[in-house]
Amino acid sequence: MDWDLDHVAVRPDGTVTSCGLHRLFDVSSQLLCVADFAGRLVAVNPAWTALLGWPAEQLVGHAYLELVHPDDVEATTANAQRLLTGEPVEGFENRYRHAAGGYRWLRWSSVPDVEEERIYAVVRDVTEDRRRQARLEEIERVSGVGTWDLDLDTGRTGWSAGVHAIYGTDPATFRPGVDDGLEHYPPEARAALEPAVSRLIEHGEPYDLELPFRTLHGEHRWIRTTGRARQRDGRVIEVYGAFHDITPQRERHLELTRARDQLTDTQQIARLGHFAADLDLGEARWSPLVAEIFGWSPRSEPITLAEMRTVVHPEDLPRFEAALREVEEQGRVDVVHRIVRPDGQVRSVRVLGTFDAGPHGGLRRLRGTVQDVTDLTEAQAALRSSEQRLQRVLTATNDGWWDTDLTTGRVVHSDRWLQLHGYEPGELPDTYDTWRALTHPDDLRAIDAVTEQVIARRESTFAVSGRARHKQGHLVPVVIRGLIEYDAHGRPVRISGATTDVSERHDARAATEALVSTVSHELRTPLTVIGGALETLASPVTGPLDPVATQLVEVARSNTLRLRALIDDLLDLDGLRERGDSFTLAPHLLTDLVERAVEDIAPTALAGDTAVAVTRSAPVWVEVDPGRVGQVLTNLLANATRYAPPGSLVELQVHAKNGWARTEVVDHGAGVPPEFRERVFERFAQADPSDARSRGGSGLGLAICQQIVERLGGRIGFDSQPGHTCFWFDLPTIERPGDGAGPTS
C-alpha cells in the first residue's frame, strides 16, 4: 500500500484521519500500523485486534518488540535498523504473540519517513501459508519428492524444499539459476537430459527420465526427473516438474538384478538345472542347463520319462528305479547315478525332487533339480583314496594327527593320537583343553613360547619336543610338528599337525647320556694326572728337553686342556640336567652383566679382527645367578665372534617388554644352515665341524645355555638368515630393589 505521507494524521488515541484514508485504515483486512523511530507503535487498525486479540490501547504507545517471539527479536531489530537508515523492508517475516497465547506468523512490508521519523507498514498473516509449507516440506522429505518451475519470461527458477534437500543446497541462501540444475549430472546423464529439456522448452514435449546424479556434497544418487510445460497462444511460457530421489528403489532393483544374475551364474557354476515331470502324461520339461548336462540338443517338445530312463547308466538303472518307487513312501527323491550322454561321455548326476499327489492319491507331478556332480564324485573318490594312503602312512610312522579350528575351539584327534596317550576313541572330549591337560606343565610353557614366536613371524610350520601324560600315569616323550593357517589379516585360524612317540629315541639318548656321564667322570682323574705329569715335564725341575720333545709335550698339554674343557662341559651339562646343580640367585641390573661379558670377550674378539659393543641397553632388573648368566653371554658371544666376518661388529642389545627382559647377540655372518636349525641346542651339535672357525668348540655351549636359561625360568631361541643372525634369551624382570619401582619398559 502506498501512503500519502503529506495528508495522513494520527490522533493521540491512535486513529488516523485525513482525506478518507482513515476509512481505508479501519476497514482493511490487512494489518496496518504506524511506528516511530523509537520502536513504539503509534497507530494500528482494527485488524490487529481481530487477528491477535490485543485492544488498540494495549498496543499503541508500546514497543513493538515486546510481542515478538524471542527467537525473532534479533532479526526484527536488524530490519528495524535498516528502516532507520531510510531503506524499505519488503517480505520480512516474524512471529507475534496472540493475546490468548501462541504466535502468528506475520509478513511485513514497511517504508520509513526519515523526516517525520515514522514507519508505515502493511502486515499480512502468513501463518496458514507457513503451516501448509511445513506440511508440504514434510511430505517432500518423507517421499523424497520435490518440485521445480521455470518462468521463461522472467527467467526465475524456483525449487521446493524437497529439491534443495536432494541437491544438498540451503534454501535460505541458495538462489538457483537456469543452469544450476544441470551441473550435478555426470556427462552421460546430461547427454540424455539436455536434449529433453530443450524439447520441453521449445515444443512443450514432456519428459520422464531416471538418471544418475551427484549432490553438492559429492554423494552419488539416482533420481527420477519429469518435465511439463504450460503454454499460451501456442508458446511455452513456463515449465515445471517433479524431482524424485529413487536411489533406494534403484538399489533394490539392482540388488534383484544382481541376485538373479548371481543365481543364474551359481546354477551354471554348480551345474544345477531344474525340471518338472507330469507322470500322468509321461513327459517332463527341463531347464536348458539340464539339457546341456544330458547332452541333448535344444527342442521345443517335452522329453518323456522313457527317454530319461534310456540315458541312465545300465549299472545304475536298478538304483534309479528303486528311487522312483521310494518317492511314494517318502515324498521325495534324492539319488546319485550315472548317465551316458549321446556323445558317449559318462557323467554323474544328483536328482533331488518332491512330488504332488493326485486327487485320489498316487504320484501326479514331480519337481526338482538335476546337478552334474561328476567332478564332486571324482574328487570324493580321490579324497577317500588320499585319506586311506595318509592313514597308512601315519600308522607306519607311529604318528597321531590332530586338527584345531581356532575360530570355534573344536579339535579332532585321530585314534592313534588317543592310543599314544592310552585312551580309546570317545573317552576324551574333542576340545582345545584336552591336549593341554595331557601335556607336562613345564613343556606347555615351552610350546606356547615357540608357537608365539612362529605366529609373530607369520611362519607356517613349527616343531617342538615335550612330554605327554599317559593314562597310566607315566610320561611319554613326544615330538609335535604343526602347520599354521592364517586369514587375510594375518590372524591364525587353524593349526594341524602330528604327534610322534619318540620313546625309543629318548631311551637311546638317555643311555648315551648316561654312558657319556660315566665316561666323563672316569676320565677326569686320569686326565688330571696326565696333565700334572705334562706340566712337570715342561717345568725346569726335570731339566731342559730337546726341541722335539718340547714340541711333543706342548702338543700333549694343549690337547689335554681341550679334553679337560670338554669333560668339564659334559659334567656341567650333566649337573644342570640330572643333578639340578643349585644356583645362587640375587637381584642384578642386567646391563651390568652384559657389559662385564663384553669386557671379558673383547680381547678374544679383537684377536679375531671382530669388535663387540652394546648397541641398545634397557635398565632392567632380573633375579639370576650372575656367574651362570655370564656363562650364557660368554658362550653366545664366543659363537658370534667365531662366525662373524672379519672387520664386522657383534652387537648386544637389551630390550624390556611385558615383564620380560630380552638379550640379543647379533652377528652378520653366513647364518645358521636350514638343515641344522632343529639341532642347534643339541649336545655336540656343530653346523660345519670342518670349518676352521668352528675349531676349539665342543658343541656343548648352546646346550648348556639352554639348560641355564630354562632353569632361570626363561626361554632361548634364535632368528637367522644370511647376513643377520640373532641368538636371544628372555628372563623375567623384577622390581628395582629398594624403591619398589617396576622395571623400565
Image (cartoon, rainbow, N blue to C red):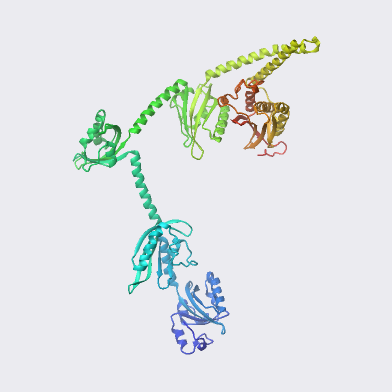
Q: Choose top left, top right, bottom left or bottom right for residue 732.
A: top right
Residue at 33% across / 34% down in the picture?
373
- Say left or right for 141 vs 281: right
Between 572 and 718, the residue placed more toward the observer is: 718
Query: Does residue 587 appear anywhere in the picture?
Result: no
Task: Please state the horizontal and vertical placement of residue 668, each as a whole percent of the image.
Answer: 63, 31
- Say left or right for 345 vs 396: left
Q: Choose top left, top right, bottom left or bottom right for residue 551.
A: top right
Which of the image's four quarters has the C terminus? top right
Task: Please state the horizontal and vertical placement of residue 303, each as a whole percent of the image.
Answer: 22, 39
- Label total for image: 0
Between 153 and 561, the residue placed more toward the observer is: 153
The answer to whether residue 515 is above or below residue 218 is: above
Q: Choose top left, top right, bottom left or bottom right for residue 237.
A: bottom left
Task: Please state the horizontal and vertical placement of residue 34, each as a whole percent of the image.
Answer: 52, 82
Query: Does residue 166 appear anywhere in the picture?
Result: yes
Which residue extends farthest bottom?
A: 19
Task: Please state the horizontal and vertical placement of residue 520, each as a whole percent of the image.
Answer: 65, 15
Residue at 47% across / 61% down in the picture?
168
The answer to whether residue 669 is above or below residue 79 is: above
